[in-house]
Each structure stands twice: as C-alpha cells, then as structure tokens.
Image: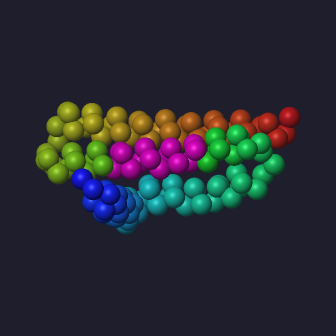
Amino acid sequence: MNAAQHIIRIVKAFGYSLEGLKAAFCSEPAFVIEVFCFFILTPIAVFFPFALVFKALLISSLFLVLIIELGNSAIEAVVDRISLDRHPLSKKAKDIGSAAVLLSLANATVVWGMALWSIYQ
C-alpha cells in the first residue's frame, strides 16, 4: 500500500467516525446530554485555577464518558440488529454496557469533586 492509499484510508476512517458521532447525536438522547455537559464543563476546567494536570484529568474524565457512551450505543445497536426478541444474553450485554456508562459517570463525578474540593482547601 503506497502513501496515497494510506492517506485515503485515513480520510475515509475519519469520515466514518464523523458519521458515527452524527448517528449517536441524532439517535441517542443520553449522548446529547453528555455532549452538552462536556461543552459546559470543559471551559470551566480550562478557566478555573487548576494545575495543568488537573485540567487534563477533568477533561479526560469527560471524554471518557462520551467514549463509553458511544461503546454502549454500539453494543445496543448490534444486539437490536441481531434480534429484538428478549433474551437473557441480550439483556446482559445491554446491562453491562449501561454499567460501563454508570462507572464512567461516577469516575467523572469523583474527579471533578476532588478537583473542586482541592480549590476550597
């Protein structure tokens, strides 16, 4: 594969990623809320008097929520594509994906809480 083919492949992959973000934004209400929170909280992380490493942790915790939500949405789409019938394994897959989102939200809450706590100590 030559350099031009690699570039074309990268550009196409980027396009697919943008399509995935658009699909999640248009069809997943939880993702929309999390994106909204990301855009509200990121400037707070940037402008608060935190050390650079705190800012990185705060923003990374928000990205992690979005990443996990995208994974959960993908799991749900695949499970629904396979069958809309109720099945214990389908429920298990969806519940585990939901648990991952919950843990990422708990992580973000703890990181933000500790950072804010550090300001007032």
Residue ID at (32%, 57%): 3
Q: Is residue 59 above or below residue 87?
A: below
Residue ID at (27%, 33%): 92
Residue ID at (63%, 60%): 40
Going by the image, does 88 lie left or right of 42? left
The front one of 34 and 60 is 60
Q: Give percent across and percent down for residue 14.
A: 37, 60
Q: Which residue lies furthest to the right in this view?
A: 121
Q: Within the magenta stretch, is there residue 89? A: no
Q: Give percent across and percent down for residue 72.
A: 35, 45
Q: How is the image coloured?
A: rainbow
Q: Residue furthest front?
A: 2
The front one of 35 and 10 is 10
Q: Give percent across and percent down for residue 49.
A: 81, 48
Residue ID at (31%, 62%): 4
Quadrant housing the C terminus: top right
**Which range is magenta?**
60-73
